[in-house]
Amino acid sequence: MIGAGTMGAGIAASASAANYEVYLVELAAAARERAAAGLTKTLGRLLPDAAGAEAAFGRIRLVDSVAQATSGDIYIEAVPEVLDLKRTVFAELARLAPAGALLATNTSSLAVGEIARPTGRAQSVVGIHFFNPPAVMKLVEVVRAEQSSDESVRRAVEFVERLGKTPVVVRDTPGFVVNRVARPYYLEALRAIDAGAADAECVDAVLEGLGFKMGPCRLMDLIGLDVNLATTRSVYEATHVERLRPSPLQERMVAEGRLGRKSSRGFYDYGA
Ligand SMILES: NC(=O)c1ccc[n+]([C@@H]2O[C@H](COP(=O)([O-])OP(=O)(O)OC[C@H]3O[C@@H](n4cnc5c(N)ncnc54)[C@H](O)[C@@H]3O)[C@@H](O)[C@H]2O)c1
């Protein structure tokens, strides 16, 4: 697992709970510390038996470079949603991962085929797109890019099933299925707030009242406004559908560092 942020740590926990040996590669020392604390909590919830949770924790090795994890069967990248960064990671995987390894990206909205380009082994690359929080959410999109082999897609589906989750195979189109369908949920809420029609609490109350588990603002705070904005930007840049244009309100909030729970403040306050 490459990247131990919101998604990487949760995916690592799900995999170790399913008996995989996991190397969790994270560059930032602070993020490694946060991940270690988060893993204990997440594994405690996934495996209520204390000995089982401890054993699962022991199956995860937190390291600071891919060079320490060169014998993997499956590599999943969850670094920030920036194409060049992901390509750098995939170029490194192409150098260091065994020839038969499955290489996967957890990208929300970038083209898997573009991320795969520097590897020279695009047939081994797929998207495995988990949802937040990854240890809880059952649905996982397995993204088949133009050059992904049937064997790679099959291995990704099998991996997701072994995690006790539900894979759906989708094509490599902007936002895949879930994020494309979900864009208007966030964007209409942002427009309503920006136009002064309602505040965040009101929008959330209305949509939660209609049966959604989380209102759009509470959900953006959980996802991270920066991560959510990056997804909107790349879906918009790939489609140019006017209704999917990024929201100036969200851009302002991200510029001000109001990123949601991870910065203690987004639409709501989460204390220091
Ligand atoms: N947050 C969500 O709700 C969500 C949901 C689905 C998919 N995603 C996708 O998952 C990916 C990661 O998102 P996130 O929210 O976990 O981001 P995050 O910012 O919480 O975590 C990313 C981590 O990657 C680390 N990192 C950066 N470069 C690295 C490198 N070269 N090697 C190892 N670690 C490196 C960073 O230090 C950071 O800890 C993105 O592509 C995002 O679009 C996010």
Image (cartoon, rainbow, N blue to C red):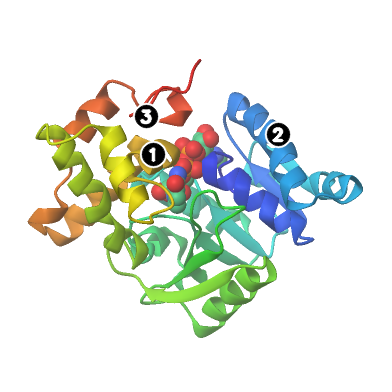
Q: Looking at this view, is 117 or 25 the one in front?
A: 25
N-term-proximal mark, 2 vs 1: 2
N-term-proximal mark, 3 vs 2: 2
Residue 81 position in % (x across, y down): 38, 45
Task: Please report contact status of discs 3 and 2: CB closer than 8 Å, yes or no.
Answer: no
Q: Amino acid at mark 2?
A: Ala
The Cα atoms of the two marked residues, 2 and 1, are separated by 25 Å
Residue 258 position in % (x across, y down): 34, 24
Residue 241 position in % (x across, y down): 11, 59
The residue identified by callout 2 is 36
Left/right of residue 31 with respect to residue 241 in the rendered view: right
The residue identified by callout 3 is 259
Q: Amino acid at mark 1?
A: Arg
Q: Amino acid at mark 3?
A: Leu
Res 100 seen here: no
Q: Secondary structure at mark 2?
A: helix
The residue identified by callout 1 is 218
- Residue 100's quadrant in the figure? bottom right
- Residue 266's quadrant in the figure? top left
N-term-proximal mark, 3 vs 1: 1
